[in-house]
Image (cartoon, rainbow, N blue to C red):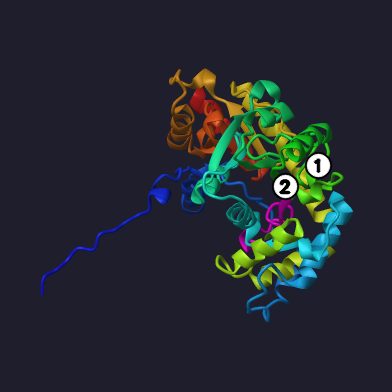
Amino acid sequence: MQEYQHRTHISERELQLHDVSISKLLKIAVEDKHIISLGPGEPDFLMSPVLQKELGKLKKYNHYSPPGGRHELKEAIAKKLRTENKINCNAENIVVTCGSQEALTIATAVLCDVTEEIIIPEPSFFAYLPTAELFNAVPVAVGMTEQNDWQLTADDVEKAISKKTQAIILNTPSNPTGAVLSRKTLEEIADVAVENDIFIFSDEAYEKIIYDSKHVSIGSFNGMQDYVITLQTFSKSHAMAGFRVGYCCAPREIAQAITKTQVYTTISAPTVSQMLALKALKSGNSYTNKMVKSYKQRRNFIVKRLNEIGLPTKMPDGAFYSFSNISDFSKDKKMHSASRDFAAMLLKKAKVAVVPGIDFGKHGEGYIRCSYASDIKKIEKAMDRIEKTLR
């Protein structure tokens, strides 16, 4: 019998997806104990004692949940959004998903046809651009700058809008810069969205990790419930990253479409995770507030050290990342691969893992992101290693 070699075919869509460093850093963080990782954006805290105790009671929840989420959890989420975020909604507006990333992915599939455009401020979370590209939508990058404190403006948004614009992604507090959009800025962007009849994907994964300002949900503004898909998660606020449970709040018709599509992705978020999320909402914010207090101490320390080392770093208002300018140490004056080269050098010589800014879009080139969701002693040791290497 003649032997044939099967031809492996990978789609052009997948081949063109950007390859980011974070997947390698996650692997390194687990496998190489000599490396201090300031890469992955994951709380180093255990879940609260209340949630740890609750987990032990959830052994019977080993079956599927309904697509879109369990009704009792959706009711609790809607109550939380009304009370804390001032968003006018009820259970029929809520879709529970495998983290807020699944909510964004399905919402993109539901709202955007081929060649329609999504405005993406940069630097931004590395998944935004490929999420658009997976569905052959067109990402339109809008650059933000260190000189403007990494702030997006309504003028920036308006200039990027075309007849094909379907949506804009907002991220506040921001990953990777930690910038927080003010109420005034959000109101101006909301006006632009309404005038041009475009949707807003409001990624609020770090809504509870905020320091010197206040989080405002754009979906809370009068009439904006028809234009905003609010994305939130339990991963950061309750140290539940591994349980993969988040949600979106959307106009009723869109929520129904997302629920319909979820049947063809994950069917539903894990039932155990949903029950744990329900307990998290009932247990209040005291444990979250303790985490934020610790993050603030770490933030103040790492930003001070980075600036002393010679890596200019703005003080972030939210999330748990610093975003540092490496231009004084970059040999690549054209900045084509400076951040990757710099991160690779730190990994090899200092044994410290950071994320290159290019992973967050071309406007992130020339910077590195450090996560301070790590023990303060590890952060101090990492700073000492970086300083020694650079000097």
Which residue position is annotated with label 1? 215
* Relative height, residue 50 to residue 35 (above, below): below
Amino acid at circle 1: His
Crowding at dot 2, Cα within 10 Å, few <14 / some 14-19 / many 20+, comes out as many
Q: In this rendering, would 388 be left or right of 83?
A: left
Image coordinates of residue 192 in percent, x first then y, are: 75, 35
Going from the N terminus, do you reach mark 2 or mark 1 first?
2
The type of residue carrying mark 2 is: Glu
How many marks on residues?
A: 2
Q: Which residue is mark 2?
A: 204
Q: Secondary structure at mark 1?
A: loop
Quadrant of the image containing the N terminus? bottom left
Is 57 drawn above or below residue 199 in the view shown? below
Q: Is residue 265 left or right of residue 56?
A: left
The residue furthest bottom is: 60
233 drawn magenta: yes
Whether residue 50 is visible: no
216 drawn magenta: no
Pointer 2 with pointer 1, Cβ within 8 A: yes
Within 10 Å of the Cα at label 1, are there few (<14), some (14-19), or many (20+) other Cα atoms?
many
Q: Against 238, is 118 above or below?
A: above
Q: Position of residue 78 (x, y in %)?
A: 82, 61
Q: Secondary structure at mark 2?
A: loop
Q: Residue furthest front?
A: 163
In the foreground, 293 or 185:
185
Q: Which residues are magenta?
A: 229-245
Residue drawn at x 78%, y 50% is: 226
Please provide percent x and percent y for residue 99.
Answer: 64, 58
- Label ID, residue 237: none
Q: Quadrant of residue 105?
A: bottom right
Horizontal and vertical percent for residue 96? Answer: 69, 63
Distance from the alpha carbon under mark 2 to that under mark 1: 9 Å
